């Protein structure tokens, strides 16, 4: 390039030997021989140390590779969890040997008899037994199978909802704007009338139009098991034990259906039919008694097999015939006790 007169603007660099090129003079090769000897001695020292360590681990019954320090770590792990794949597996096996439970299984309660069930037997409450004239002729006990205190209120409330929702017909229905007859024509032009724009006469904003979010036929009933209903009714009856009055059999006590005779009878046994809500529970068909009670506004009469939770909770006094009282205890009482008494 110089011979042709072309000049280069790149700076001239001093000539240096290529990387890895061997020095040409003995003086330059001497420092390299010294560094090589030092490296060889260091490698020999490291080999001696690793060999001694391997001999120590082999004398202890462990195998150790001299290729990498990770082998020493593996040996330490093997020393801690010998015979197991991991520390977690060792802990799981030891726990299984102690408790007999596999991983993920919760231990059972050491005292299974202390587990709380859904129902208990209430403490017995003495109830007076009166005759037709209102005189106390004996006493009886009331101890039903009721719900536990922590769940009693919620269970009775759910049964009350169950009964009240069953009374709802659920037939209320309204028409939407798509169901109202008419409205296919635009009532007036879009503009130049001074009124708000409308597209149909049956819009919910005009009289005679549809109903926005109106009621439609629906089922209000809720599900509740028979066992839950029985326990809820027993809980309500047991809680009203202070207002329960047991009377003798009413068969033959009413010669004719007279409201006056029923009113005087309820007054004699300790109720106020004109002021209080009274629930009368009788056993069987007492025609004259039923006809005498149907004209009293605050009086409800029923059988022990068809009691209503609304009547039990709303009654100020509960008058129960002796036969109906025994039937009620057989239905809502504890089954083992009834079986023992029958035996």
Image (cartoon, grey):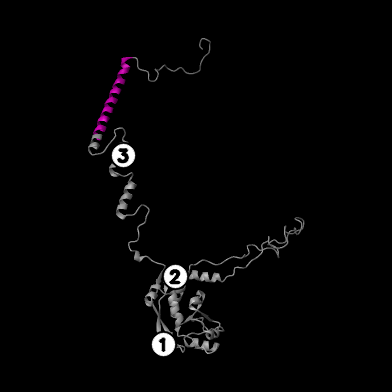
- Whether tag 3 and tag 1 are in contact, CB under 8 A, the answer is no
- Please report the residue visible at 49 percent of the width from the left and 70 percent of the height from the top: 159
Q: Can residue 160 be seen here?
A: yes
Say the numbered circle drawn on residue 74.
3
Magenta-highlighted residues: 25-53
- Please report the residue visible at 46 percent of the width from the left and 80 percent of the height from the top: 324
Asked if residue 148 lies left or right of residue 206, the reply is left
323 vs 60, nearest the viewer? 323
Asked if residue 278 lies left or right of residue 192, the reply is left
**What is the magenta segment's predominant secondary structure?**
helix
Secondary structure of the residue carrying tag 2 is: helix
- Residue 77: image location, x then y, percent: 30, 42
- Whichever of labels 3 and 1 marks the residue nearer the N terminus, that label is 3
Asked if residue 216 lies left or right of residue 58, the reply is right
Circle 2 is placed at which residue position?
152
Cα distance between the residues tagged 2 and 3: 62 Å
């Amino acid at each position: 390039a110089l011979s042709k007169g072309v000049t280069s603007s790149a700076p001239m660099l001093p000539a240096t030997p290529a990387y890895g090129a061997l020095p040409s003079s003995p003086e330059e090769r001497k420092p390299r021989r010294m560094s090589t000897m030092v490296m060889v001695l260091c490698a020999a020292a490291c080999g001696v140390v690793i060999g001694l360590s391997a001999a120590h681990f082999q004398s202890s019954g462990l195998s150790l590779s001299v290729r990498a320090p990770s082998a020493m770590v593996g040996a330490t792990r093997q020393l801690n969890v010998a015979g197991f794949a991991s520390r977690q597996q060792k802990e799981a096996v030891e726990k299984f040997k102690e408790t007999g439970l596999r991983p993920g299984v919760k231990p059972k309660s050491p005292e299974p008899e202390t587990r709380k069930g859904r129902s208990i037997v209430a403490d017995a409450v003495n109830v007076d037994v009166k005759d037709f004239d209102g005189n106390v002729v004996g006493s009886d006990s009331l101890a039903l199978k009721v719900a536990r205190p922590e769940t009693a209120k919620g269970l009775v409330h759910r049964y009350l909802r169950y009964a009240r929702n069953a009374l709802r017909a659920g037939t209320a229905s309204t028409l939407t704007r798509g169901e109202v007859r008419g409205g296919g024509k635009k009532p007036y032009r879009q503009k130049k009338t001074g009124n708000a724009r409308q597209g149909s006469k049956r819009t919910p904003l005009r009289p005679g139009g549809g109903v926005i979010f109106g009621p439609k036929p629906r089922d209000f009933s809720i599900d509740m098991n028979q066992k839950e209903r029985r326990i809820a009714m027993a809980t309500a009856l047991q809680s009203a034990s202070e207002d329960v009055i047991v009377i003798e059999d009413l068969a033959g006590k009413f010669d004719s259906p007279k409201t006056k005779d029923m009113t005087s009878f309820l007054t004699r046994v300790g109720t106020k039919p004109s002021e209080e809500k009274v629930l009368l529970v009788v056993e069987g068909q007492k025609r004259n008694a039923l006809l005498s009670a149907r004209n009293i506004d605050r009086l409800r009469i029923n059988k022990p097999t068809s009691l209503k939770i609304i009547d039990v909770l709303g009654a100020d006094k509960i008058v129960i015939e002796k036969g109906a009282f025994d039937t009620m205890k057989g239905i809502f009482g504890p089954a083992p006790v009834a079986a023992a008494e029958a035996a």
